[in-house]
Amino acid sequence: MSDSNEYARLPADLLAELLTSAPRVAQQVSSLLTPALEQRSALRDAASRHGLICTSEPAKATTLCAADGGFAVERTIAVDIVMAVAVGVEGFGEPGVTSPWNTNQYSSFHEVALHDIDNERLARAAMMTHELAILADAPHQVRIYDGSHLTPIIQLNSGYSSRSPKVHEMSVNMGIERGVVESLTAFAANPQIISMPKYDSSADIARLLGQAIGVTIPGDDKYVTSLILRGGEYTRPMRVSGAQWAQLHLTSIARSLGETSGLLGELDHAIDPLRRCQLFFMYWRPDDAAPTYRLEIKPELAHSPESLAVVLASLAHQITGPFVREPYPQYLADVMAKSVGLGLSALKAAAHLSLTRSQPELAPQLVQSYRTEGK
């Protein structure tokens, strides 16, 4: 059998029933997206009046890399195997220019633990700790984080706030060993580190333009800006706002290692620029055939059109299209990191073989599992 999961298909009757819903789904899509499409010209005019549309100036591309991470938890009969990986991928360089990295960068964490519902929290914190380390240490002028600036704080806090003493202590010790304070400080303040989240539900610009033309626009910013921007244009950088930024925090249980070691206090100080909204967002359309991309950038870039032009030229140099609709190193880092499940399966198979030879009575406890969970 070419694929061990070939049998796991939807029942034919269920699939047929789902397909009968296609017209209703199409109608729902139309009702959600048509209003902005019909108002495209008016929305663009409103954006121009508000000074929201900027044109990227020609610039020379510079060095660029991207980092991404993934995690998986294998819940076997007797234990959990926790794995997290982070990878860094370098962008295309100019001919004759030496690459800052000789190879792709990588870092990993794996641990065997007794069953604990919070082991996934450990995996998330491990993934983020290693990913931030790669970004902070990269020598490139432009470094892409695949996600929002909110995400690392949420993922790290998942481990630090765990009520499982084991998960909490391992998350904290890992952060201390991997220099997470320095990494998170760089992430929050270094203008060379930008964020490019793929999924984006924000609608600040859509609401602003909708109010300007007196029409409620049900689309989000990514969709609306893809309609009104032309190739080479971007929206004027705007400061992030909202409770999700003002309430950013890292916490742990009172008198836990995170608190007594001082780590949580230092990390909370490191994210203060984000909490004070010292971060800007913008949407950029590299060419007429591409959608827009959301970028989260530091104030130094937001206030310097010349520096921002270099970043956009560097990103444009990495978009190969039409099938890879993001900077290629960001795409490749994502593919590599999300293959963590394959790495976990290989590790489990090797460990099972070793146990089969040394302690065969334990081997079945490792090979039999409930299900691999990861992302």
Image (cartoon, rainbow, N blue to C red):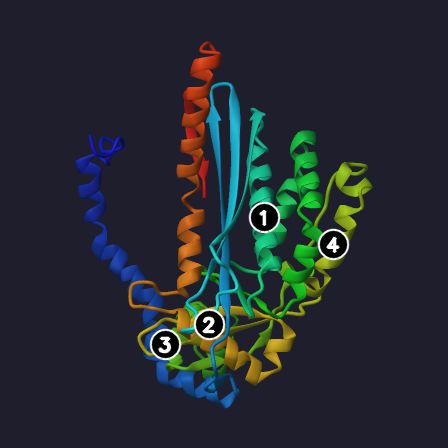
Residue type marked 3: Leu
Q: CA distance from mark 2 to mark 4?
A: 39 Å
Q: CA distance from mark 3 to mark 4?
A: 39 Å
Q: CA distance from mark 1 to mark 4?
A: 18 Å
Locate residue 177 relative to residue 368 in the image: left or right: right
Q: Position of residue 60 (x, y in %)?
A: 47, 81
Q: Nearer the viewer, mark 3 or mark 4?
A: 4
Which residue position holds label 4? 268
The earlier-in-sequence mark between 2 and 4 is 2
Label 2 residue SS: loop
Q: CA distance from mark 3 to mark 1?
A: 37 Å
Q: Position of residue 122 (x, y in %)?
A: 60, 38
Residue 356 versus residue 254 in the image, above or below: above
Q: Is the residue marked by circle 3 packed among few (<14), some (14-19), or many (20+) residues within 10 Å?
A: some
Whether residues under marks 2 and 4 lie with C-beta atoms below 8 angstroms apart, the answer is no
Instruction: Pick the residue in front: 105 or 250.
Output: 105
Label 3 residue SS: helix
Instruction: Inspect this view and state whether residue 196 appears.
Output: no
Which residue position holds label 2? 97
Residue name at image x 43 percent, y 82 percent: 233
Residue name at image x 25 percent, y 60 percent: 26
Residue type marked 2: Val
Res 227 label: 3
Q: CA distance from mark 2 to mark 1?
A: 28 Å
Q: CA distance from mark 3 to mark 2?
A: 37 Å
Locate residue 203 relative to residue 39 in the image: left or right: right
Quarter of the image for the C terminus: give it.
top left
Which residue position holds label 1? 130
Residue type marked 1: His
Q: Nearer the viewer, mark 3 or mark 1?
A: 1
